[in-house]
Amino acid sequence: MNPDTAISDVEARIDLDAVDEIVKPYYGKKEMVIPILQKVQEHYGYLPRPTMERVSYMMRIPLSRLYGVATFYAQFKLKPRGRNIIRVCKGTACHIQGSPKIAARIEEILGIETGETTDDLRFTLEEVACIGACALAPVITINNEPYGRLTADKVQNILDKYQ
Amino acid sequence: MNNLYEKHLMICGATGCLASGSQSVEEALRTELEKHGIKDKFRVVMSGCPGFCEVGPIMVVYPDKVFYCRLKPKDIPEIVEKHLFGGEMVERLLYKGPDVEAPARFFDTIPFYAKQKFNVLRNSGLIDPENIDEYIMRGGYRALTRVLQMEPADICEEVKSSGLRGRGGAGFPTGLKWEFTLKEPGAKKYVVCNADEGDPGAFMDRSILEGDPHTVLEGMLVCGRTTGADEGYIYCRAEYPLAIKRLKIAIEQAEEYGLLGENILGYGFNFKINIKEGAGAFVCGEETALLASIEGKRGMPRPRPPFPAQSGLFGKPTTINNVETLANIPLIVKEGGVEEYIKIGTEGSKGTKVFALAGKVRNTGLCEVPMGITIREIIYDVGGGIKGDREFKAVQAGGPSGGCIPAELLDLPIDYDSLNKAGAIMGSGGLVVMDERTCMVDLARYFLSFTQKESCGKCTPCREGTKRMLEILNRITEGEGKAEDIDTLESLAQSIKDSSLCGLGQTSPNPVLSTIRYFRHEYEEHINDKYCRSGVCKALFNYKIDTERCTGCTACARVCPVDAITGEKKEPHEINQDLCTRCGSCIERCPENCIMITPVEKKADVSS
């Protein structure tokens, strides 16, 4: 089985009632699959396999097609994520103002690569195409809180604020 | 009953200013007004974007039109005391800059605004975007009431004669697009507003949605009335939560006023609008991919024809317009609108264009300028020139689908056709300014890595071709470039352009082609001399301290994360090249600008 979609022990005990509540208003409306997955992810933090199976069953959409949609869009996550989500803006303005250096420093401090989560689930490091705060480049957001006009030496202090 | 206020205090509540802290300024202001018991005299509004993100958070006080910038919560008591009670401006919080002699007030004297022409952004920052009454008082929904009494074909004629072209990318004439859908038979048609603004470095659509959502709704209503559609979708990026929130509020209010829904204003016209949140896929900005995504599928493009006008959303005739295009519509179809509209712009491109000005320019932010303005005027007059007075190198227009425009073309008047000729595109209107410290090879690599990642994988030339090109560019920036690489890049680029299905693929090689066209010498330098003169490609340069000019202030040594810089206080410092990771912290910190970028010196001893 694909390690991304394997069911862990924790996942096997997940309460699926919320999925039922989310799907109910959309019965039979197959075009609403993206909003459904968005809501499921909002509730569970990511898309655990049992929730995908449940959505598939209730919506009469093959599981393969559901995963097809979930893996196509960057927003959907198939693995658990950290308590704090760091997003490094990779927009053009941020890039030329040095966002790669910021990302490199965060990776160095946390010992993870972009896209990964620390073992203690404290941080997940992601990149985002552009948050549109180009005037404040380079920008990162932590839990949607933006930090602008960054330099690499400011990173440690910012990360220390989040446990 | 509505209270009459003495002054309106408009705090910018758009993403840029929120990121620089406007929320806490607002809270401080509300607390202060409460404290003095004057909250019924002064109205605080979180407004749309006045554009000048560089100096945010911004607050404009009306009717005085006083423009306060770079506000902090601790400035608020002084404003309340001096300005609101005393009637005097707080001079130290006004705009100051190298481009003005004395502290400046609003539009009157700030150079950033002098050359701008507010059409699309006419309400942004001036009204409360969450209050439909303010939009109506500024002439809103008047275009709708007019078109409700007109024949669809006549409305279409007006839009055609305005010369409006799509603001989302290719610049297709909007009126013509509408006519295609109008002529299609069928009882069910759709209007889709493309708000999937994915170009990194472009944020004009977001600002319109956040600052004046009703103008977009009105544009959609007019389009629906013209083409015979009764349902609309707004496909908006999920990364724009504030825009989505304001759209939802706007839709609710319009429904309440009978401007949306059944039998609008009693003319028998029905129209409803749904919002669909995107889920993070750049290719969904392409119209057929966007439709697939609304239908709940993977957002992959399909071949055209059939065009969406014939078979679009759920197989029905569909008109797809971008946010800024729709925001132009109420101006055009209002009474006497066309005559006014065609006065601005050039022969082939009418009206204004909103640009997002970012990168190494002094005044970053959003600006709306007449078509035909030169790049020099945008960068030096509106933008205030290059940050740190470095040398201008190029400006990237049109994001990852566009190209760069070098210094030789600074006097190029901007419109759809001139930009195409220069190898760039209007695109959605992102302008990213670059100076001598931007490496053009790295820039091309950056854009290609973006399109490569966002390629949906349907067409081989785009999926595999961009990957091969990226591998070559990676090699060049790592110092492993070969002499034949430039030719290989050009030939791959041509194949991808010729054989990809959608706009994303066809335009993906543009940044590479245009940087080769104008900056071939930089490629050659990377490949032949293994030198990156801009100090970006880490393997291809060294930092060196100019010992003549170094004052020994120790700023660089303190900031160096690997302790590669040594030297006594007040003595010239030195960088140990073996330890240096070229993170660039020192060069950003050096107050004397005495850290230089030099070619990598070949070491005498090769023992490792």
Image (cartoon, coloured by chain):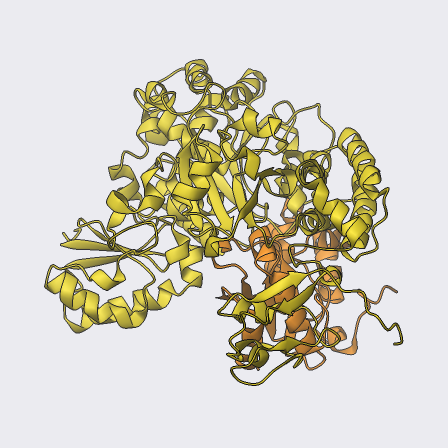
Chain colours: A orange, B yellow
Quadrant for the C terminus of chain B in the image: bottom right
Give the tally of numbered discs.
Answer: 0
Q: Nearer the viewer, residue B77 or B476?
A: B476
Residue B508 in view of the camera? yes
Task: Kindly tell me whether residue A17 is visible in this rendering.
Answer: no
Quarter of the image for residue B187 reads top right
Residue B251: x %, y % from top left: 41, 44
Query: Which residue corresponds to the image point at 64% horizontal and 76% vertical from the top-left?
Result: B574
Q: Please name the residue shown 68% across and 61% down the image.
A: B598
Find residue A151 and report its image quarter.
Answer: bottom right
Q: Is residue B385 left or right of residue B417?
A: left
Residue B382 location (% of width, % of height): 39, 43
Q: Position of residue B506 (x, y in %)?
A: 72, 34
Residue lying at 56% horizontally and 24% vertically, measured from the top left: B417
Q: Is residue B536 above or below residue B270?
A: below
Percent x, y of residue A131: 54, 55
Depth order, front residue of B582/B364: B582
Residue B217 or residue B481, whichever sits in front: B481
Q: Left or right of B608: which side holds B60? A: left
The vertical placement of B359 against B303, above or below, is below
B121 in relation to B269, above or below: below
| Outermost residue to the bottom | B568
Q: Extreme left residue here?
A: B86
Between residue A47 and residue A131, name the one nearer to us. Answer: A131
